[in-house]
Amino acid sequence: MIDTVAGPGAQPFAVQLKALTDLEGRYQPKLSGLRLIESAQDNGLRMTARLRELEVKDLLSLTRFFGFSSETFSLAISLLDRFLSVMKIQPKHLSCVGLCCFYIAVKSSEEEKNVPLANDLIRISQNRFTVSDMMRMEKIIMEKLYWKVKAPTALRFLRLFHSHIQEQLDAESKKILSLERLEAQLKACHCSFVFSKIKPSLLAMALLCFEAQEQHDPEHTDTVSEALKSLQQQLNIKDGDLVCVRELVGKCLAEYATTKCSKPIRQRLRWTISGRTARQLKHSYYKITHLPTIPESAC
């Protein structure tokens, strides 16, 4: 998969778009598997949507604790959803599956010097399985996903779309769509199971449309809306599908903004780490919120 989005030497937008959309369908979670998770009763015996959402929030905390990139988090969620959609796992194994997906994403996206030892990752996440357990589970995950890791995530599409649209706008209109805010909103959406069933390109498009709609600045949003409409036509996205997902995005972000959602766990976490790991971590990562605040718009 291509890695360029913008900048010197980047491939033309049309080329990048085709490369991502051609791969998108091959990396989608199996819909029938996701529906089984969605319909499962929360009795502790089967994998459920709620358990998946709790695991994703834990992975978001780990991402922030280590200061890993948004790309690492999005890729971890892609791996997790793809695996859960093809394998029936017991809830007791979910933490191992989630951490393995996270570790695979870390090794694929982060610089080698920043990749923690598996043992440190287990202790920091406060899990009780062993490194050997992780190694076995990682092998299972990779085999079931046919060793295909670098999926075209919603983040990849979001960055590509944002870069393309910004090129068409004047200085004032460019302030409408903050990439930092959009990426934070995407993380919130990843925490909701409903978006696992939606194509990454459609989710990225819906986020952009929702953000443009929320700005309430007709003077500049009209230009942005025209650029988005043109992009929608290139992607062959139906109006009804876009409106539906945009409404889901709005509902998700409204729930995410509530106090209850922002602070789901009040107890203080105790991190058990080695001295070497402690020296490598930035002090600010020891005090994190379970879910980050989405930044205000720059304009």
Image (cartoon, rainbow, N blue to C red):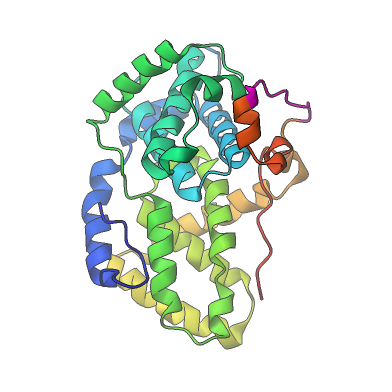
Q: Nearer the viewer, residue 137 or 261?
A: 137
Q: Residue at coordinates 22% horizontally, 30% vertically from top-left? A: 146
Q: Magenta region, mostly helix, strand or loop? A: loop
- Percent x, y of residue 86: 31, 26
Residue 61: x and y in percent read 61, 36
Image coordinates for residue 141, horizontal then vertical, percent: 32, 24
| Quadrant location of the C terminus in the rendered image | bottom right
> Could you tell me how many numbered marks the image carries?
0
Residue 228 visible here: no
Residue 240 occupies quadrant: bottom left
Name which residue lies at 69% across and 64% down. Answer: 296
Please indicate whether residue 56 sits to the left or right of residue 104 in the image.
Answer: right
* Nearer the observer, 21 or 45: 21
Judging depth in this view, the residue of 295 and 9 nearest the camera is 9
Q: Is residue 171 left or right of residue 88?
A: right
Q: Is residue 193 magenta?
A: no
Q: Is residue 137 visible?
A: yes
Residues rendered magenta in the picture: 266-275
The answer to whether residue 269 is magenta is: yes
Answer with the quarter of the image where residue 176 lies. bottom right
Q: Position of residue 188 (x, y in %)?
A: 58, 47
- Left or right relative to 110: residue 181: right
